[in-house]
Image (tube, rainbow, N blue to C red):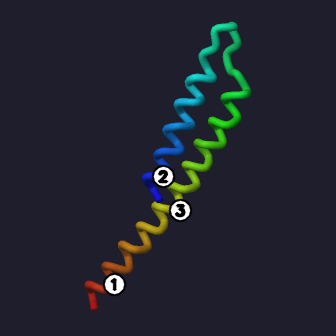
């Protein structure tokens, strides 16, 4: 799950960079920036869930090893 999160975040950052530099002189192109922010947010949520799951599994392994 965390690998997928990093993938979404990296694609979002690439899209953001492509949208930030525009030859017409505009600083940010909303057509690129809005999906980029959504991809970064989705990646952040997936990372948070994956990190939480990983931490829970680690605690369960410690509990099993202690018994």
Residue 35: mark in rendering: none
In the picture provided, is 3 more to the left or to the right than 62? right
Q: Which type of secondary structure does the marked residue at label 1 adopt?
A: helix
Q: Residue at x 36, y 72 (%)?
A: 58
Q: Nearer the viewer, residue 67 or 5?
A: 5
Determine whether 63 is above or below 17 in the image: below
The picture places residue 10, in percent across and down from the top left corner, at 49, 38
Marked residue nearer the N-terminal end (2 or 3): 2
- Please name which of the two marks, 1 or 2, marks the residue nearer to the observer: 2
Marked residue nearer the N-terminal end (1 or 2): 2
- Please name which of the two marks, 3 or 1, marks the residue nearer to the observer: 3
Q: Which type of secondary structure does the marked residue at label 2 adopt?
A: helix
Marked residue nearer the N-terminal end (3 or 1): 3
In the displayed image of the protein, which residue is found farthest to the bottom? 67
- Residue that mark 3 sits on: 49
- Residue that mark 1 sits on: 63
Q: Which type of secondary structure does the marked residue at label 3 adopt?
A: helix
The picture places residue 45, in percent across and down from the top left corner, at 58, 54
- Please name which of the two marks, 2 or 3, marks the residue nearer to the observer: 2
Q: Residue at x 56, y 25 (%)?
A: 17
Residue 4: mark in rendering: 2
Number of marks in the rendered image: 3
Q: Residue at x 62, y 46 (%)?
A: 41
Quarter of the image where the C terminus is located: bottom left
In the picture provided, is 59 more to the left or to the right than 29? left
Q: Are marks 2 and 3 in contact (CB under 8 Å)?
A: no
């Amino acid at each position: 799950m965390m690998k997928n999160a990093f993938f979404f975040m990296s694609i979002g950052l690439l899209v953001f960079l492509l949208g930030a530099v525009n030859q017409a002189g505009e600083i940010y192109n909303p057509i690129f920036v809005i999906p980029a922010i959504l991809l970064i947010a989705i990646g952040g949520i997936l990372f948070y869930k994956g990190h939480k799951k990983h931490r829970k599994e680690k605690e369960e392994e410690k509990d099993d090893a202690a018994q």
